[in-house]
Image (cartoon, rainbow, N blue to C red):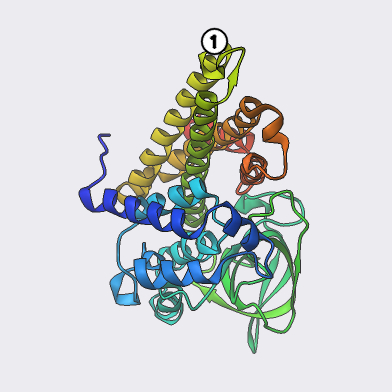
Amino acid sequence: MTFTFTEEQEELRIVVRRLLAQMSPSPVLRRAMDSEWGYDPALWRRMAVELGVHGLGIPERFGGCGGGPIELGIVLEEMGRALVPSPYFSAVALSGQALVASGDDALCARWLPAIADGSLIATLALAEASGGWRLADVSTEAARTDAGWTVSGTKMFVIDGEAADLLLVIARAESGPGLFAVAGDAPGVVRTRLETLDPTRRLARVDLEGAPVQPVGTVGDTAYLRTVVDLATVALAAEQVGGAQACLDAAVQYAKTRWQFGRPIGSFQAIKHKCANLLLDVEAARSAVYHATAVAAGEPDGLSVAAALAAVWASTAFTHAAKENIQIHGGLGYTWEHDAHLYLKRAKSSEHLFGSPAMHRSLLADLVGI
């Protein structure tokens, strides 16, 4: 597959990078992650209103601006590079793509315009107390009653689950797993913020006890739900590549300016080797992610394989880059004042969202018949 970005896509990257550099430098990032909801409302509004990136991947008939996984991947890569605390990932990359993939035009018309204009924060709830991210691990139960559908169970590690207005919950019905929508403040819904390693991304536990829900798409359609999980995996991998590149850039820049024994530390062979190996990891991960976004945009039959491959490479590269960045910075990299530790915390938490690299390797082996 030959893949290149169009002129418009490159311009999108430039515009997003410029806005994030202006509105989310380190001091603003730290204030946002410590705020009540964990993000900067001013940046959220500007991204929605001025750039319109909340509408990426959402058809124009539902209030979006079109585009798809490639354009969305560009924005997520830049947000990962800047380590932006934002519900953009949960609202647009997870929920927006899930609603579009469902093919449920009535519910898309109801919620997608609000996601596109930034007035609705939604999220996807998949993992449970077992920590599993596969559809086969889902034990939360959906039941159909005379009054409608209800869901009971516990969802863990729900991204922005405390702040979300709308929860898209994957639960198991009699006919199989399905996607169900429930308001964040609906009766029977209890949300609890989790104490996590990564302060830049809020996670929550969501307990549902007979909560009234609405099915999204066809209940029991595992193929569509597999697509939803694959799209989420690719979106996360794009964000991870951005974070890995930021760590590489920071390490190289520091190696050029930090002098020891009368010369820059970047002139020492050990540091050169570290940076060279990081470059190989990051570029390999980027290739896997760009391939996955291209497959998601045009060749959905190969999406599961491409998503698993991207997840393995991006998770591994980000964690490696974040660790080496701290090592190259030496004692400075271990301080709270430096952002290196924030990237490492994001890398480790992201490594286990939607499954660990080991899980994706196992999945990839099953998919290709090894």
Q: Please, is residue 100 above or below residue 303 in the view?
A: below
Q: Residue beneath label 1, please?
A: 269
Q: Residue at x 72, y 57 (%)?
A: 128
Instruction: Name the spot of residue 343 as percent of width and height, x first.
Output: 61, 42
On screen, residue 94 above or below 149: above
Query: Residue 206's quadrant in the figure?
Result: bottom right
Left or right placement of residue 142 versus residue 222 in this view: right
Q: Is residue 217 visible?
A: no
* Side of 58 where 265 appears, left or right: right
Q: Secondary structure at mark 1?
A: helix
Residue 235, x across and y down, in percent: 47, 51
- Looking at the image, the residue that sits furthest to the left is 7
Residue 165 lies in what quarter of the image? bottom right
The three-letter amino acid code for the residue at tag 1 is Gln
Quarter that holds the N terminus: top left
Residue 321, percent across and down? 57, 31
Residue in front for this viewpoint, 120 or 259: 259
147 and 49: which is toward the camera: 49
